[in-house]
Amino acid sequence: MQAGSDTLSDFPADSAMLAAIVDTSGSVILGLRPDHTIFAWNKAAVTLYQTARADAMGTDYVQRFIAPEHRDAVAADIRRVLTGAVTHDFEDDSLLPDGTRRTLLWNVSRVLDDEQRTIGVVATGQDITERKEAEERFRVVFEHSADGLLLSDDTGIVDCNPAALRMLGLREKHELIGRRTAEISPFTQPDGTPSDEKSRGIGAATLERGVMTFDWVHQRADGHPVPVEVSVRHAALRGRRVSVIAWRDQSHRAEIERQRMELEQQLNVTRKLEAVGQLAGGVAHDFNNLLAAIRNCIQLVMDEVPEEFAFRDDLALALTTTERAARLTGQLLSFSRRQAPLAECVDLASLVHDMQPLLRTSLPASVTVRIEAVASGARVRADRGQLEQVVLNIAQNARDAMPSGGTLTLSVGVDDDAMQSTLTISDTGMGMDDAVRQRIFEPFFTTRPLGEGTGLGLAVVYGVVTQAGGTVRAESVKGVGTSTCIVLPRSMDDVTEPPHEDAPSETVVERILLVDDDAAVRVTTRRLLERLDFAVVEAENGIGALEVFRARRADIAVVLSDIRMPGMDGFRLAREVRALDPAFPILFISGFDAQVHKDRRGLEDIAMLAKPFALDKLLQMLRAAIASRPR
């Protein structure tokens, strides 16, 4: 018989060599009659199909060994070859007796007898299962990779995966095939080099090194930049050199880097604010001691000067000036979180409404005050007086930003999910740039002319809000205005009602143990107390005071003690006194906030009077302390 123009016998003896070649070939070789029955079956077929020649001969090859979904295609191809066609590289899946499948690549031609009549086909097959699986694995990786993958050669891009199309905002491969790098890039790269020039340079370097990794910016059809990290490696594909390119989208990395820099900047500002706050708190404490001595001295002199003396007005002015100085140090302490807050439950909506008349009188008539979106239940735990100061300070800044008038809007909100209450104060003023906005909470920073501002207004806002466990941020647009948003933890407590003051009782002559390491404060305070008919015993530190208390406890009505002293501070003294007498009346006086000290734990019932103090306030708190002792 003949296959094509070559004659093949039925392997008689004189064709033994040809039969041996066919039988020992590494390729599967089989012969099929027009009805698909097998008439030739070499050793490679025996091995692949796990079927002996005797068992295979005469059986229907298509029905027995071809996967069901391929049988029609194989039968059609056999019919076509029987008419004279030749099949090259025909693929099908063969089904083996053990249930496994193998993919074969076939070349098929017809077989003729000596009279040129078609008697069947001969098929030569190569097992390409492993190759197909490798190709499929590569295709899955290629198609589903999150990175853009491309192949390019001298003509441009020859293939790409869906990720590369998505990065560029394209839908079909033909939109990218044939294009060069510079055609899908902005005219220049971030370093200012033209994209075409830089692409050629990188291409030359890649040829030299074989592999390159670099940053690049492509451009979508809508003009949007696409920052990517590019890896390029040269490879050979069917005899020609190609470039294997991977794009890793860096948009997310750029955003993370931006956020990191922003957080780093915020951290630096916070550290600076904390450092300045510590310095400011220390200065304010020492300054308060000086003010206390000065104020006491002025009060002593005023008590000696008759009403009709002219210089009494000068003394009153000096006394008022010390009060202004005390407010300034109070602002420093608020910023440094050392101002003693009165913890109470405050309703922000009520606070805003109650302050509306004050705001209208504090601001020029050209500024309109509006209250919007006042949510119910916006309760916080903070010092109401300090929160009022926060609103006033922000309002005063807004006033300066609206010299020709405008609108000041206050809104209160609640975030139930985050358990937060918000107070937002917005103006329609001049606004500010980012450089100024980033510094507005720094103490002593001001944009006002020299001598027209302390630079502590917004620093106090920062201190009060952070002390209450909240955050404050400002957003501003030049020429549009500024919005300051305060976020505080929401409180579910009942709103604290203002205390009802009892009518003052007559002054009780009692003995006071006065403890203060500052001699000027101690002496002037003693003289003031003696004028109020108190008897005073002095001690310059906690150790000396404890000795006096142990010796004269029965004669002492109350301990009036500073907090920060060398040796034994006021907290330790209070504990020693309470160890001897658990209910003994004690009153702290200090320019330093006791409530930020861990050492105050267990002493929260002891009131504190901040230096410098007014005489009537001192008298009121002393009476309250003495009256608190069980009789």
Image (cartoon, rainbow, N blue to C red):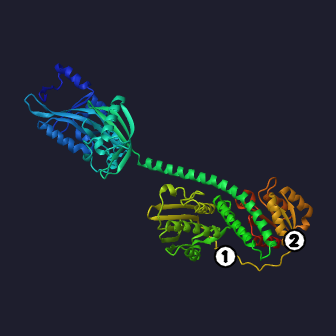
Marks 1,2: beta carbons within 8 A: no
* Mark sitting earlier along the chain (1/2): 1
Residue 132 lies left or right of residue 15; in this view the side is right
Question: Foreground residue, 87 or 257?
Answer: 257
Mark 2 closeness class: few <14, some 14–19, many ≥20 residues within 10 Å: some
Which residue is outermost to the bottom?
Answer: 503
Q: Quadrant of residue 575?
A: bottom right
Q: Name the residue: 61% across, 70% down.
A: 388
Residue 311 lies left or right of residue 422; in this view the side is right
Which residue is outermost to the left?
Answer: 115
What is the spatial separation of the Cα atoms under label 1 and label 2, in whole angstroms?
A: 32 Å
Which residue is outermost to the front?
Answer: 310
User: Would residue 99 be visible to someone looking at this image?
Assistant: no
Q: In which quarter of the image is residue 524?
A: bottom right
Give the residue at mark 1: 497
Amino acid type, callout 1: Glu
User: Would residue 360 be visible to someone looking at this image?
Assistant: yes
Give the residue at mark 2: 510
